[in-house]
Amino acid sequence: MSKVEVNNIQIAFDETGSGSALILLHGFPFNRTLWREQVFALSPTHRVITPDLRGFGESDVAESPATMADMAQDVVALMDSLGIERATIGGLSMGGYVVLAFYKLFPERVSALILSDTRPQADSEEAKVTRAKQAKDALAEGMAGIANSMLPKLFTPASVATKPHDVQRVREMMMTTKPAGAAAALMGMAVREDHTETLAQINVPTLILVGREDPITPLSDSENMQKAIAGSQLVIIDNASHVSNIEQADQFNSHLESFLKQDKLANDVGA
């Protein structure tokens, strides 16, 4: 683990492997270890960077709200500190929100996009109210309430029964998240920009992945993204819910590896 100061906070990150840069952004309320299986699979061929977004893992908590644009600014500052001009940027759930904010702000820094179990639209008014309550509860009572409410939506019932170690690992990630960091991110997600119109502007190779049984960001959201992003690929991960990268890691990694190989070939041809 390394740390770097960006935008007046310390951001923790892991950097593994060499080659083309691949930056993977975790969802809420997780940390960089969400990507453990992907780092293992992809670091032999890529320089994989997995940061703890502000307020999560070993990164500092900043002022609330922690907006998606703030997190995108942190990522580009991290790239600058590591001497990375362009990278493939990927994110799951909230990480996907940050990816879309990043692309809108810094399209010239993106060579390809990976959008996993995420969506472009902003929160509804009802969702904003729910996030405000969750933030208040987290600050008052800790992370147990959020963990208990989210966990049944993160895995399929079959995986809950057959993959207890994965379920426990994800629960521990949530329970060890700093309540202040979670609250800041909840308020940041509540005010995030609607990026539905941004999708048509995306002109880099884009891979969209989604668990077939994801109730948080349903398959229909990914199907709509695929229609809006010219030339994008949609992969449906069977027997998976919201953390499809953990629940069906082999499936997920196989599709990532294939996409990254295609993107490298396209870049080599165009070089």
Image (spheres, rainbow, N blue to C red):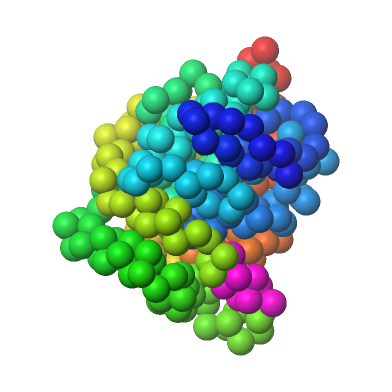
Percent from the top left, x then y, of residue 45?
79, 37
Is 170 inside the magenta-drawn segment?
A: yes
> In front: 181, or 161?
181
Furthest-bottom residue in view? 161
Is 187 inside the magenta-drawn segment?
A: no
Q: At 39% from the left edge and 51% from the top edge, which residue is drawn?
A: 185
Q: At 71% from the left edge and 61% from the top edge, which residue is drawn?
A: 250
Percent from the top left, x then y, of residue 19?
77, 29
Q: Is residue 203 visible?
A: no
Q: At 64% from the left edge and 15% from the top edge, which residue is drawn?
A: 270
Q: At 65% from the left edge and 70% from the top edge, which residue is drawn?
A: 169
Furthest-top residue in view? 271
> In front: 134, or 259?
134
Q: Is residue 128 visible?
A: yes
For the stretch drawn in magenta, the main secondary structure is: helix
For residue 20, side relative to residue 151 (left or right): right
Percent from the top left, x then y, of residue 230?
41, 33
> In front: 38, or 53?
53
Q: Quadrant of residue 87?
A: top right
> In front: 260, or 86?
86
For residue 49, side relative to residue 133 (left or right): right
Quarter of the figure that contains the N terminus: top right
Quarter of the figure that contains the C terminus: top right
Residue stretch in magenta: 165-173
Percent from the top left, x then y, of residue 117?
47, 56
Furthest-right residue in view? 44
